[in-house]
Amino acid sequence: MAKVNYDDIVFDSQLEVDYYKYLKENATYFVYHPKIGINTTSKNKYYPDFVAYYGDCRCEIIECKGYSQFSYLKDNMI
């Protein structure tokens, strides 16, 4: 996938840019490529694309992937 530059940030895909735009409008606070690692059932650590916080105290961990990449995550990490 080609890198995409938007808002002086280099994103991994256009899908990440689109989600970034969505979060700017809807989240109270969010972080792109947060420095957190989440343990999975496999030996790998999972690093999300975004962590978003909302005014109603919700927190979302967001991964922007296409269908084939989601299948890989499901089969190998979750």
Image (cartoon, rainbow, N blue to C red):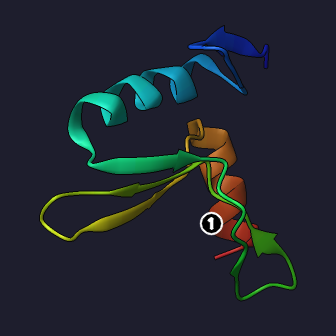
Above or below, 32 against 2 in this view is below
55 lies left or right of 52: left
Which residue is at 63% across, 76% downward? Answer: 78
Q: Quadrant of the N terminus?
A: top right
Q: Position of residue 2 (x, y in %)?
A: 79, 13
Label 1: few (<14), some (14–19) or many (≥20) C-alpha neighbours in 10 Å: few
Residue 47 on image: x %, y % = 71, 61
The residue that appears at 67% across and 48% down in the rendered structure is 33
Judge left or right: residue 55 versus residue 13.
left
Name the element at disc 1.
Answer: helix
Farthest right residue?
A: 43
The vertical placement of 46 against 8, above or below, is: below
Residue 44 is drawn in which quadrant?
bottom right
Give the camera-side residue of 71 and 24.
Answer: 24
Q: Nearer the viewer, residue 5 or 45?
A: 5
On screen, 55 above or below 42?
A: above
Say which amino acid is labelled 1: Lys
Left or right: 42, with 52 as reference point: right
Q: Quadrant of residue 59?
A: bottom left
Residue 51: percent from the left, percent from the top? 48, 57
Q: Which residue is mark 1?
A: 74
Percent across and percent down for residue 16 are 55, 29
Residue 46 vs residue 23, the one in the foreground: 23
